[in-house]
Amino acid sequence: MELLSPAGSPACALAAFDAGADAVYAGLSKFNARERGENFTPEMMKKIVDYAHQSGKKVYLTLNTLIKECELPELLETMDIIDDIAPDGVLVQDLGVLQLAKEYYPDLVLHGSTQMGFHNSAGLALAEKLGLSRVVLERQITMEELSAIRKQTKLELEVFVHGSLCCSLSGVCLFSSYLGGWSGNRGKCKQPCRRRYFSKSGNGFFFSPQDLSALDLIPQLRRIGVQSLKIEGRLRQPDYVSNTVAAYRMMLDCPEADFEKMLPEARNLLSKGCGRRWSHGFYTVESTRELIKSDAIGAAGLRVGTVEAIEDNGFGFTAQKRVHVGDRLRIQPPSGDDGVALTVTKMFADNRNSKYARPGQRTFICCDKEVVFNGSIFKIGESFPDYTRRLESLPRRKKTVDLEITVSGSSLSVKCKNAFIDEYTVPLQLKNAEKHPVDSAKILSAFAESDSRDFALSSDSTAVVSGNWFFPAAELKQIRRDFWNGFHRQISPEQLIDNRICALDRFRTDYLALQGLQVTEEYLRETVAMKPNGAEPADRRAIRADNIFDLNKLSQEAILPEFCPESKLAALKKAIAAAVKSGIKRFRVTSLFGLELLQEYMPDIFIAASAPLPICNSAAVRALKNAGCSRIMAHVEMSRQDIIDLQKKSVLEVECFRLGRPSLLTTRAKIPFAGEFSDSRNNRFELRYEKTTGLSRIFPVKVMSIPRIPGVFDFYDLRNANWKNAETEQFNFETEWL
């Protein structure tokens, strides 16, 4: 199995490879799910990819956020850069990114991010049709479900084995976005699930899961047939990466007979990672039940003390654990809100300037940051080697030169296909070869030695030899040297023709010509989602939608669930068949796997792609049209302008969520209460547990209600709301969606 490490920075990538990672995943500064991290410049990413390939390692690049319509041109420019970088795979979340990659950069190998929410075999069947070669599975599937899924697909499966866990099902969390527009689906999550909340049942960190550590599950994952074990942590530093990778490398390489004996040593390495308490995450029923410890503060790290004194130049505390210069600390407010982080550069122990403090010593940390009295002090990292020189010494990637070489007995000629330069020709007087005649491989091998810091021979270069000739090695070497010397004098790296520009130009032409579907109906029929056995919609012309398992004689549209574990797929298929037989012709898909379940009934049915499935741009709409959809719902996080931009370019009918209470967080974890609760800013929410699905959901108390947009269809969700709610809000509709 592949051991896959996070690399939030170039230094982390080197640390991962040094510690034994087979591959790393990393992102550029834009359009990746960890935009708060240091990330990579394109040039540094090229260097890391080249370094990895020289060592037989791999690099996967993350392009796994949702994309607004107005961002598509910039996205294509980023994809063009990624195509030039040539990573071993690209992780995607947005269907639009997937669609555009297939259309304009077909050589990119695409992996489905966990944010795509694949969690059953139906979803993986669709993933294969979409052109994905690997899928990172939903983190909330059990080991038994993983085993069952593995038997149903040929796709490569990647699973998380270590690090922080999101409380919500992947790709559907709106919690951070609701509390200020900072979307977790766009790499800007503020981690509200780690904060303290207040309810009639008591106060606590109700949505903060323990960390995942599946070190002891490696033999089981190997037997199941998982291809890649993924460590979470692109916001972490090289010390965490090094220790965590080393621990998993140790156990992956360990003989099965010695596995139990080696576990304590590997766990000792993991303990240096300064995380939260370990668990098996959602892999077992028992762990899922115990995952939330509401009395445990949501911050990660090793607790080393509590702020007891605050001065202008720092803060004091009694050390509970060893603290050293170079350590990284976070001071967490009692509220659980985001705390300040710092690196210890100067400290005092028992009033003496010191490089470290032992447990029990009075300690003072010098800093200019504002800390909170009584704040909890966590060590979140230790000092690590300086990788600056190693990174600076990594060679710059050479520009590839595409040559067409022709050899006869009387001449050798070289044409350059990606530079405006005259053909290079050398007269020859070759003799027939008695043994070992020169061939195209030898010619290309000779010219590949360019002796250049700037240029390298392209793999697309060709050589044709006419005849059976003996070519003295020294003569060939001199010709090669003369060619490259002349090439350097005439051409700079910037003058080479980049054929990939054609893809960008083609996109720009296609995009300018793209016309959205023109809706001419005077009355746009509304769709109303109803409670089980609820009354008819207020407007009799409206389409009544009901959950697939709650259909009745009044139902006109069936809503499929966004989550269906493998064990319940058969029941859902039967429900769909029964609905079709009863005359239902309209279906609402809320997760990608639903499209696969409806395949056999197409094109005789009407399919709407709907929340929580996020659709944000016209490229995603085209992908859904190709999959059989007739209508899409604009993602509920989007602003008014985002929806208008999408509608102008959408090739399908566009609908918006006009009224209802969207689920902000959906989880299989057992939450220790139910009912209404609030945060420290008095934002009010409601937690509901569904016994039939085993899912808990957070809903805002206020009902989302937005005005009509011309040319856009309306969706009213009355399953958790009604027409006359006193308290309403507009989510991100009139603000910027970040």
Image (spheres, rainbow, N blue to C red):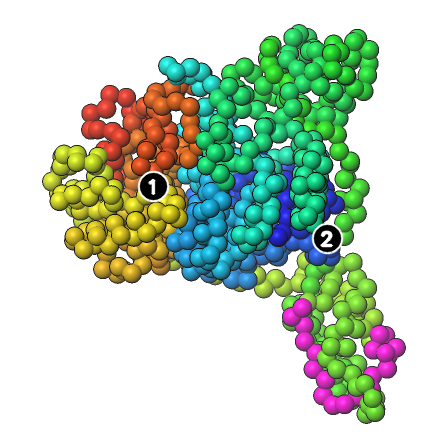
Distance CA(mark 1)–CA(mark 2): 42 Å
Q: Residues within 10 Å of mark 1 (few under 14, many from 20)?
A: many
* Residue 327 x, y percent position in the rendering: 72, 25
* Residue 603 x, y percent position in the rendering: 26, 61
* Residue 155 x, y percent position in the rendering: 50, 57
Magenta residues, as a range? Answer: 459-478
First of labels 1, 2 by sequence position: 2
Q: Residues within 10 Å of mark 2 (few under 14, many from 20)?
A: some
Residue 110 colored in magenta in the image: no
Tell me what residue is drawn at x 75 percent, y 33 percent: 384
Q: Is residue 183 visible?
A: no
Tell me what residue is drawn at x 70 percent, y 78 percent: 463
| Residues at discs 1 and 2 in contact (Cβ within 8 Å) | no
Q: Which residue is mark 1?
A: 611
Residue 468 colored in magenta in the image: yes
Tell me the tag on residue 686: none
Q: Which residue is mark 2?
A: 51
Q: Amino acid at mark 2?
A: Tyr
Q: Is residue 412 visible?
A: yes
